[in-house]
Image: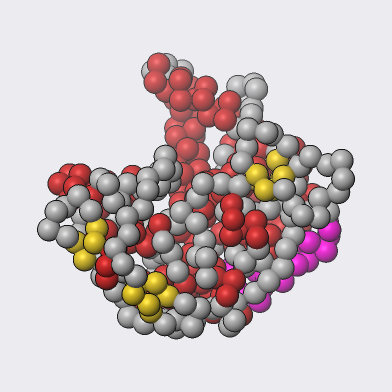
Amino acid sequence: MSVDTQADSLGTTPSLHSVSISQSPMAINLSTWPSFDSTGSATQSGPDYLPLTRTNIPVLSFLNEFRASLNASPEISYARELSKRPTVPALEAFWREQDRTLEAIFAGAAVPRLFLAHLPRDLPEIPDVKRRKETFITLMLPHVLAVNEEIFRDRNRILKLRSKLAKETPLTDAELKWLSKIFASYEVTTMNFDRLLARVDIIPPSLSIAQAAKESGWGSSRFAQKGNAIFGQWTWNLRDKGIVPKERPEGESYRVRAFDSVLAATRSYAKNLNTSAAYKDFRKSRSALREAKKPISGLALVEALENYSTKRHNYVLAVKEIIKLNRLKLLNNVELSQTSSAASDKGIQIFAQN
């Protein structure tokens, strides 16, 4: 199930400000960290130290460990702090200085691995529709690509293990344990590899981003801003975090599911499409494309997602329009940036656990 919302916006920013590192390696001195208003003007704020939570990147309290074991540079520390306190101008400055603007990505540039704890709080305040849309697309890209990377890695491992079994090669205890876990995770109750592989497969970035845009009003909805509810998932499970819709009919108990990070929301969205009975036609269509060796594209699969919204075919038409008008099909073949060193690779591994 989903909640449909509407909205739009995006633009320019001042140059990137580096975070200064204090003499003590235990903390980042944020006295030079600027905050930005919706016009892009910087205002200075005093030193600030952020609390840790289970899902947050340990940038501040564990900076000493980063510098010792990861050899983290000020640039890496800046990116990590940006992930915790994103603003539209700061994100734009980061992308521009990395030469990773949306136009550069459309032209083939790799997508930086920047994962956000939450959407920029100033995103709804950006009056320029084009600017807000470009910001939303660019910030969502690493999350949808990272989730696809995880899925593709699992899919390849499944294929290798199936090949071993076909050759009557015994699996190790670790392989059997992992395989059992993946079958359970994707809710496949029999040892049916074809059914499992139909579920362990990627979501086209064009489709993920178009649905996120539709469901969250380009990142501006109350649900997206308050709870990273970017894909409009509903929950009836009291153990899930959730937000009660103001317009929820009397007698209903569903909530819009909330998440601790943008990456967590994206993972849940992909798992929803890959396991829910409501989207079995989506999975059949994707498997057919695989069988025919055709590209896995959003425009090819969106027709099978009428069940995602109570608006049904009108929802499908709206998502198609978003894909076409915003050139999202160009994103189906983009890739995440590769790490340049063992140190940064370690840092990104921790970073991506959010």
Left of 203 or right of it: where is 36? left
Front-lying residue, 57 or 350:
57
Q: Is residue 115 above or below residue 97?
A: above
Residue at position x 40%, y 58% from top? Answer: 83
Dominant secondary structure (helix, strand or loop) of the stretch shown in magenta = helix
Give the colour scheme of this rendering. secondary structure
Residue at position x 62%, y 53% from top? Answer: 229
159 in magenta: no
Q: Is residue 184 above or below residue 49?
A: above
Q: Is residue 243 above or below residue 40?
A: above
Q: From where the camera sits, is residue 7 visible?
A: yes
Give coordinates of residue 25: x percent, y percent: 16, 52
Q: From where the camera sits, is residue 105 visible?
A: no
Q: Which residues are magenta?
A: 311-330
Q: Is residue 304 above or below residue 210?
A: above
Left of 168 or right of it: where is 78? left
Total marks placed = 0
User: Can you name the residue that lies furthest to the right here?
Assistant: 250
